Image: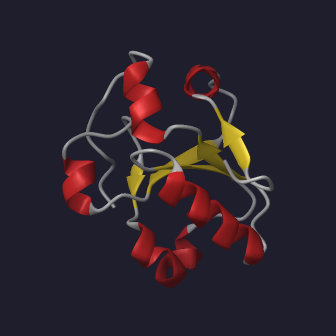
Amino acid sequence: MYLSINEIEAADLVDWLDNQARTFKIVDVREMNEIGAGTIPGAVPMPMASIPLRLNELPRDEELVFICRSGARSAQVCAFLQKQGFDKVYNLRGGMFAWAGSGQPIGLPKAS
């Protein structure tokens, strides 16, 4: 979608989740009413508008996968974070549409 953004496919994210040795966070940047309807199990809710105010909650040394409904908002978040010096950010290509469309589980977010 965005040329300089690292993107990850739903199938690859499943592999990451299955790899117990891999340390990363999934951050859902949709609005809370959207997240409440279901997200990737264990995702941290952090609506897009709150990202600039919550930068200190995002570890710079850990891989971060950002998700939204279609992948557009999360790609914008990735671009913003790259400008802030984050280099381990990934956008879930196709967002929750791709995740659900590939038959993956939908669950509740982590308590923030």
Residue at the location (41% across, 53% down)? Answer: 44
Q: Is residue 77 above or below residue 91?
A: below
Q: Position of residue 21 (x, y in %)?
A: 69, 28
Left or right side of 6 for 57: left
Q: On screen, 49 above or below 78?
A: below
Horizontal side of residue 48 vs 5, given as left or right: left
Locate residue 92: give its quadrant. Answer: top right
Name, please, the residue furthest toward the top. Answer: 103
Residue depicted at x 71% and y 54%: 2
Indicate how the structure is coloured in the image.
Answer: secondary structure
Tell me what residue is drawn at x 41 percent, y 76 percent: 49
Q: What is the count of numbered marks?
A: 0
Q: Is residue 110 left or right of residue 16?
A: left
Q: Quadrant of the C terminus?
A: bottom left
Q: Nearer the viewer, residue 79 or 2?
A: 2
How far across and down, in percent of the image, does residue 90 sit? 67, 48
Q: Image height check: is 14 above or below 1?
A: above
**Residue at x 78% of width, y 52% of height:** 3
Relative placement, left or right, of 47 versus 16 is: left
x and y percentages locating residue 103 in the rendered image: 38, 15
